[in-house]
Amino acid sequence: MTELQDKLIDAILTHVAFDGWSDESFRAAVADTGTDPAVARALYPRGARDLARAWHDRGDARMVAAMEAADLTEMRYSEKVAHAVRLRIEAIEDKEALRRAMTQNILPLNAPDGAKMLWQTADRVWTVLGDTSDDYNWYTKRMTLSGVIGSTLLFWLGDDSYDGQATWDFLDRRIDNVMQFEKVKGKVTSGPLGRVLTAPGSLLNMIRAPQRRDDLPGRQG
C-alpha cells in the first residue's frame, strides 16, 4: 500500500462517522489530501466502497505483520487463532467506521463484497498460522472462521465492557466451537463413512483449494 493510499484511508475515516462510506466522504478525503480526483478514481473506481475495501486490506496486513512478529511458541493452536482474530479487531481504528461499513454490507448489492472481506481475513489468519490443507478442509476452515469473525465483530460493536473483555471471552467461546467442529469432522472423516466420502473419485476427494493465490474467494478481482 502506498503512502497516498494510506493518506486517503486516514482522511476518509474522519468523515465516515458523519457521512458514511459515501461519495461525499470520498470527495472530502480527496480534497483533504490534495489528491488529483482523476488519480483517486483510478485507484478506487467505486469511490468510498473501494476505499472501505482498502481499509479492510490494511487491517488484514497489520494483523499478519503482528502475528509474524509475535512469539507464539507457548500458545496452543486454538489460542493462536483467537490471538490472530483479536489482533485483527484491534487493528480497527474506528468502531463507527466499521459499523457504517457493516450496515452497507447487509444491502443485497454489497453483501457479496462483505462476504469476500470476511473470507479474505479468515484465509489470511489460516495462512499466517501455516495451514497446509489443500482439499475440502481448506474451505471448511475458512467458512467456519469467517462466521466466528463476523459474529465477534458484531458483538464487539455493542461491547461496553472494560478493555473489551466481554468480546475476548465471546471470541474464546466461538474458537472453542470451531475446534470442536474440527475434532468431530476429523472423527467422521477417519471413520468408515469418511473413507467412503473421501475415496478416489468421490466428490470430496475431487475438491481442491485454489491453485492461484489471486483466485481466492476472498480476493478482490
Image: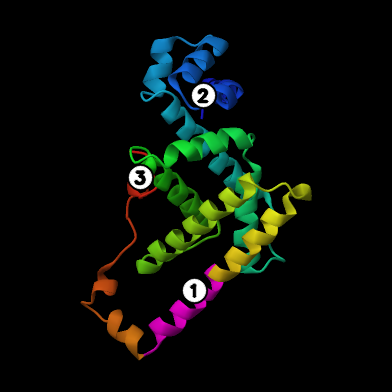
Q: Nearer the viewer, mark 3 or mark 2?
A: 2
Q: Position of residue 129 (x, y in %)?
A: 55, 59
Residue 150 makes an appearance in the image: yes
Return the mark for residue 182. Answer: 1
Helix, strand or loop status at disc 2: helix
Q: Quadrant of residue 58?
A: top right
56 in relation to 151, above or below: above
The residues colored magenta run: 178-191
The Cα atoms of the two marked residues, 3 and 2, are separated by 21 Å
Q: Position of residue 24 (x, y in %)?
A: 47, 17
Helix, strand or loop status at disc 3: helix
Q: Amino acid at mark 1?
A: Glu
Helix, strand or loop status at disc 1: helix
Question: Which of 191 and 98 lies nearest the eye of the viewer?
Answer: 98
Q: Nearer the viewer, mark 1 or mark 2?
A: 1
166 on left or right of 137: right
Tell whether label 3 touches label 1 (CB within 8 Å). Answer: no
46 on left or right of 207: right
* Residue ID for mark 3: 214
Q: Earlier in the sequence, mark 3 or mark 2?
A: 2
Return the mark for residue 5. Answer: 2
